[in-house]
Every structure is written in C-alpha cells, then in structure tokens.
Amino acid sequence: MRNDSIKLHIRQYYAALYENKQPRHLPVKTGRLLAECLNYPLTLLHFLSDNYWQHFLPCGNPMGLLSPKSGDRLLNLGCGAAIDSFVMAALHKDGIEIVNLDVVFTALHKACCQARRAPFEHMLRWLCADGEKLPFQNESFDWLLMNGSFNLFPQKSTVLQEIRRVLKPLGVFCCADLCAASMLPDYFEQEKDAWAWCMSGACTEERLGQLLTSHALECMRLNRRKASGDLLYPVVFSCRKV
Ligand SMILES: C[S@@+](CC[C@H](N)C(=O)[O-])C[C@H]1O[C@@H](n2cnc3c(N)ncnc32)[C@H](O)[C@@H]1O
C-alpha cells in the first residue's frame, strides 16, 4: 500500500473516531481505565468531562521521561486528546510552553474546549498540521513527545528528519508506541485498520535503534512491557539529538 493511501486512511479513521462516527472496535483498553492502569495522575485531570476520556488513546505513559525546566518548549506531535500535555502543564505550572499538533482538527477542537476548564490554558498552543511537514523553524523545541503516533508514519525516516530538524541541540524525543518481536508477517501491510492501531507500522527494537542512530538520535532509555509470545508489545523510550 502506498504511503499516501495509508496516511489518508489513518486521518479519516481518527477523524471519525473523534467525531464518534467510528465503531469503537479497538483491540485495546482506552480512556480513564487505561489511564489508571498506566498510573496517570488522575487527580490532576479532575477538570475533564467524563465523556471526554474515551478520546484518550495512548500507547504508554512516557511522563517519567519528560523533565522540562522553566522556559522550555515541548511539542506533542499527534496529541489527540492532549492528556499528556494537560499533565505536563499541571505539573510545570507557568514555566513551559506546550504546542499540541494533530492532523485531525476535531481532536484539537475538543481538547482545546476541555483546556478552557483548566487553570493552565495559557500554556497551551494548538495547531492542525501533518507531522511529516512540521510548520516550525529549525531548533524550535527542547522536547518532542509522540504517544501512539510514531507508528502511524509509514515512512519513519521522513518524520524522524522532521523531529531532528525542529529539536534544539541536545533536545529530547520521547515516544510511547508498539515494537514488534520479529518482522511482521506481510498481511499487516495490507490491513488499513492495523495501521491506524499502531500495529502495521511497528518495527523491531533492532530496526528502531538503527533508525534513531541514522538520524543522530542517541537512545537514552527504553522500557518495554513484553510477555513471552507477544508479537507486538509497548515500549517507551527517549533519545537525545546529538
Ligand atoms: C493513537 S492516537 C494517540 C493520541 C494521543 N497522543 C493520545 O495519547 O491519546 C494517534 C494520533 O495521531 C494523530 N495523527 C495521525 N497521523 C498524523 C499525522 N500525519 N500528523 C499528525 N498527527 C497525526 C491522530 O489524529 C491521533 O490523534
């Protein structure tokens, strides 16, 4: 399948999901239940309306890998419900700026409406764009986060080039997504919904390491939750632009 048709399907899939038009047959836990399992600090998120939680679709909890200091700028690429951004803003009060970017406008609109109920709305920016063509100058961000969106890019080199370009020197890329225990069978490539579920775009840890190294991103930490026999398993990792 071509890059363009996969990306179009993914965009339409998430647009329908955030507009509640997509039957929710996701093969994973989502929402508040998942946030609890992943140890998200729910008390910081008390302002969210109950029915908003269904839009939270993370692959993991990368919060422990992010430690912005006052004045830092963070890009949440493929922010969706932006719950990671809300946690970061609540933890870091006035000190940081968080830019939320997603290719689906409805996600941003809904997240922005929720943010109006929070005391840190002024720390958040909202932008609708494609992660492969980031509308920022070189070296704009200290931190770049992708939670469940890295595997939605069939051409990882293209998005990694953009990530590297917009990160400042020594800036940190943090990511939560799925890895594959071995090369995925060919039929994953043809399964459009498996692309949207972050499965078909998963690579092995070895391949991931090669991709990061070839874009001069130095892996600092990688945590996996893998049971024996799992073909796909969640990882969270951070790497530094060198
Ligand atoms: C699995 S969801 C994760 C959303 C969010 N990070 C979270 O934890 O709930 C993936 C998100 O990536 C967005 N996305 C997909 N393709 C994208 C692209 N090319 N550029 C920017 N965002 C994209 C989707 O619209 C969706 O909001």
Image: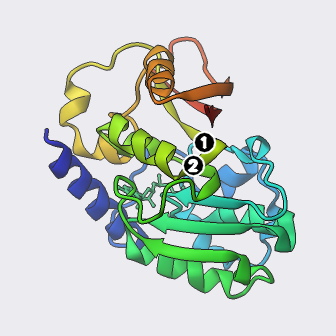
Q: Position of residue 226 (x, y in %)?
A: 61, 20
Q: Which residue is mark 1?
A: 173
Residue 109: tell me if it is visible. yes
User: Is label 1's Cβ within 8 Å of ligand 1?
Assistant: no
Does mark 2 have its CB less than 8 Å from ligand 1? no
Circle 2: element type = strand
| Above or below for 155 versus 148 | above
Q: Could you tell me which residue is drawn at 58 percent across and 81 percent down?
A: 112
Q: Disc 1 to disc 2, how far (Cα)?
A: 8 Å
Earlier in the chain: of badge 1 and badge 2, it is 2
Using a 10 Å C-alpha cutoff, classify the residue at mark 1 as few (fewer than 14 neighbours), some (14 to 19) or many (20 or more).
many
Q: Quadrant of residue 18?
A: bottom left
Height in image: 5 above or below 124?
above
Q: Residue at x 22, y 47 (%)?
A: 6
- Report which residue position mark 2 lands on: 167
Which dot marks residue 45? Answer: none
Q: Residue at x 51, y 12 (%)?
A: 229
Across and down, in percent, residue 141 comes to: 61, 56
User: In the image, what residue type sits under mark 1?
Assistant: Phe
Instruction: Say what amino acid the circle numbered 2 marks.
Output: Leu
Residue 208 vs residue 1: left or right? Answer: right
Q: Seen in the image, is 26 located left or right of residue 238?
A: left
**Label 1 close to label 2 by CB (< 8 Å):** yes
